[in-house]
Image (spheres, coloured by chain):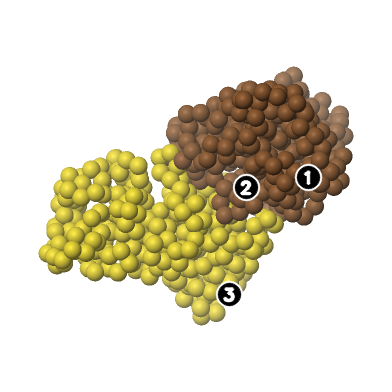
Chain colours: A brown, B yellow
């Protein structure tokens, strides 16, 4: 019998399940619609059915642990707490319900911490004990590894740079406050910056032909690659903002590598080139040249899954 | 023979030496003028003389380790690196020189990390594994403890919130950049805020009778306690800035306690009352009410010394 784990990535729309071996190979991958389950217990049933099907599909394997990455999941007590993007309100007994239903050890954390573990076990951070993973999706997530271990803090909510103040009294954030970093640096932040530039600059742009509520980060990216100056400026500013945030990140945890990951990272050099310039410029003297910025070396489509699987393997080896 | 350690606090002007037992009692305390030693090797000689005198003074004790707190001291390689406030330029072989001269184990770290260890061993953090110490002196220092251990990072320079960006393109900082947190929140930051208020507000104040280069944080404090509205506003704003910084600190390391320490902390409720209000207001929802702000429970005069001694004890017990 070969030991394997199940990695689960619970997202607001879909939840993806993977049967993953110790070298990070995904033997099987399935998904269910998170948002069709109004009741959490019904979701657990559906998940159990998926996991049972893995067992039948690979009878020569033994599932040793289940790792679950979910928004606002607490590593210590295994609950999801007041997740804004999930239908299940209040405190959801994620770990307990899965353990009870499947009689297997279950470990949980939030998406960004799972991504950091995935980078460590299966990606570009195999050799590093001090690194940060920045996820640039709808929001701005981050996972910190210090001395080889994920930084959790008292309630396991440490290391979320997306809600640090970036600009005093700046853009309104979904969290109810103003000026949070993710209102500037994220897919939605890029769109907001683009719209701001419509009023600030007098550069023509095909993006001006669109109603602002139809502008997406993808459209800004396409315009930029087509040579649109305004869209390019939106990317440059986003990169400069991120450069400042990463310079602050250096001051906080003094890593040797910062991995960039998620939808916006697909912009490639359009983001990376100005980012590296801004990062060096804005870094404190003592940190200049001491860390590298790289793209994540996990395949984007599977990164969340591999992160959850890495969490499971880490727990299994404890 | 009773085991004891020597704690050394190297400051720009004075260096203080203490013979400290395991319960934090300072058996003897001596100091030398740091800035009278242009050559580091002469400083080491003078320090050795002090330590030899401790041995003669307390023949029934055995010094087991020396702990040294110094600006910009590197925990891992035992050097002081390009310290702006010391006469010894470049990279100073702090640990090696002391070990060679005294044939004792030596451990080094910067002042803020030493303060955090002091709080853990001898102060208010005995029961806490997740806390932050903020030192409000000329600058803004910070030491982070996570899972019971000081957060060092790759080069041991982690956790220096004083140089995180607080206001984009804000006040010029000694580090050569702009908008760093310590240009707003520190003794000098308070003075700069006071001067800014001279131009912003139309409130009368006895502080307006002084040349601005003669305004000190102490004078602002005295004016505030005498009921001066402008000086009070300077404290309130400083407290609000600090509240924001502490809210960001929560997001970083998710501590259960934040200790405030250093010259400005002497302002007591003048600082603490608006600080607590601002901290709650600016905290991310998930962190509201989850951490307490307290004054350091180390005696201010001995805190740096006790921090260095705590570092030595920690090393001894490894």
Q: Quadrant of residue A43?
A: top right
Q: Chain of mark 1?
A: A
Which circle marks residue B229 in the picture?
3
**Residue position marked by numbered label 2 in the rendering:** A75
Q: Residue, x 32% and y 40% (percent of image)?
A: B77
Q: Residue, x 72% and y 40% (percent of image)?
A: A102
**Residue position marked by numbered label 1 in the rendering:** A85
Q: CA distance from mark 1 to mark 3?
A: 46 Å
Q: Chain of mark 3?
A: B
In the displayed image of the protein, which residue is found farthest to the left? Answer: B56
Q: Position of residue B74 (x, y in %)?
A: 35, 44
Q: Nearer the viewer, residue B224 or A52?
A: A52
Q: Comparing marks 2 and 1, which lies closer to the viewer?
A: 2
Q: Position of residue B265 (x, y in %)?
A: 47, 68
Residue A174 located left or right of residue A37? left
Query: In this rendering, does residue A13 appear at all?
Result: no
**Location of residue A31 with respect to A175 vertically, above or below:** above
Q: CA distance from mark 3 to mark 2?
A: 47 Å
Q: Position of residue B36 (x, y in %)?
A: 20, 55
Q: Comparing marks 1 and 3, which lies closer to the viewer?
A: 1
Q: Chain of mark 2?
A: A
**Location of residue A104 with respect to B23 vertically, above or below:** above
Q: CA distance from mark 2 to mark 1?
A: 18 Å
Q: Nearer the viewer, residue B196 or A114?
A: A114
Which circle marks residue A14 in the picture?
none
Residue at disc 2, secondary structure: loop
**Location of residue A151 with respect to A303 vertically, above or below:** below
């Amino acid at each position: 019998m070969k030991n394997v784990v199940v990695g689960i990535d619970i997202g607001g729309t879909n939840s993806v399940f993977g049967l993953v071996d110790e070298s990070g190979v995904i033997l099987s991958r399935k998904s269910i619609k998170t948002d069709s389950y109004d009741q959490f217990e019904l979701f657990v049933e559906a998940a159990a059915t998926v996991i049972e099907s893995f067992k039948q599909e690979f009878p020569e394997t033994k599932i040793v642990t289940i790792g679950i990455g979910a928004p606002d999941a607490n590593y210590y007590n295994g609950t999801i707490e007041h997740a804004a993007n999930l239908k299940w309100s209040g405190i959801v007994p994620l770990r307990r319900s899965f353990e009870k239903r499947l009689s297997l050890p279950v470990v949980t954390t939030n998406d960004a911490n799972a991504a950091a573990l995935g980078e460590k076990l299966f990606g570009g951070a195999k050799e590093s004990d001090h690194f940060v993973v920045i996820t640039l999706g709808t929001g701005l997530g981050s996972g910190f590894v210090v001395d080889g271990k994920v930084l959790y803090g008292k309630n396991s909510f440490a290391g979320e740079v997306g809600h640090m103040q970036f600009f005093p009294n700046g853009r309104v954030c979904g969290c109810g406050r103003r000026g949070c970093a993710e209102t500037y640096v994220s897919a939605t932040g890029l769109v907001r910056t683009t719209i701001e530039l419509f009023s600030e600059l007098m550069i023509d742009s095909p993006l001006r032909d669109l109603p602002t509520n139809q502008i997406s980060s993808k459209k800004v990216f396409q315009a930029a690659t087509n040579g649109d100056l305004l869209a390019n400026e939106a990317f440059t500013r986003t990169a400069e903002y991120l450069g400042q945030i990463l310079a602050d990140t250096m001051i906080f945890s003094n890593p040797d590598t910062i991995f960039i990951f998620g939808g916006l990272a697909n912009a490639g050099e359009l983001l990376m080139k100005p980012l590296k310039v801004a990062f060096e410029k804005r870094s404190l003297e003592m940190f200049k040249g001491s860390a590298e910025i790289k793209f994540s070396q996990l395949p984007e489509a599977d990164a969340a899954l591999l992160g959850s699987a890495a969490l499971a393997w880490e727990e299994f080896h404890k």
